Amino acid sequence: MTDVPFPVLSENDPDGEGVLATWFATDGATVREGELIAEVAVDKVDAEVPAPVGGVVRFLVGEGEVVKQGAPIARIE
């Protein structure tokens, strides 16, 4: 099992928070390593989140939820 972290997008505030904007994958979907699975936003910066490994995605966070940078947003089994 591999955690998918919310990326640290604000070097000025690495302990800050952001929002999980959109899931590109569905909960329970099988993804390949490098496939885009989510988009996140911190302040005015958006970033795409690729799957770090292949496997089945299990969401830990819903769209629109506020998340601390570096915290897990999903797990891949």
Image (cartoon, rainbow, N blue to C red):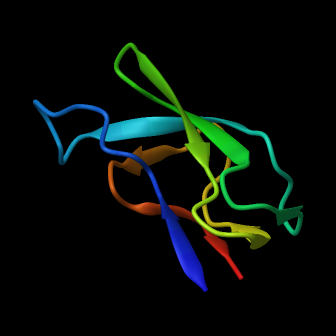
**Residue 18's x, y, as percent?**
40, 36
**Residue 12's x, y, as percent?**
10, 30
- Image side of residue 10 versus residue 2, left or right: left
Q: Residue furthest front?
A: 33
For image coordinates 30% across by 43% down, the residue present is 8
Pick the residue in front: 59 or 48: 48
For image coordinates 34% across by 20% down, the residue present is 43
Q: How many marks?
A: 0
For image coordinates 38% across by 61% down, the residue present is 71
Is residue 66 shown above or below 12?
Answer: below
- Image side of residue 71 versus residue 49, left or right: left
The quarter holding residue 38 reads top right
- Image side of residue 42 versus residue 4, left or right: left
**Residue 69's x, y, as percent?**
33, 48
Is residue 16 shown above or below 73?
Answer: above
Q: Residue furthest left?
A: 12
**Residue 57's x, y, as percent?**
76, 68
Query: Quarter holding the N terminus?
Result: bottom right
Query: Quarter holding the C terminus?
Result: bottom right
Pick the residue in front: 48 or 16: 48
Pick the residue in front: 7 or 27: 7
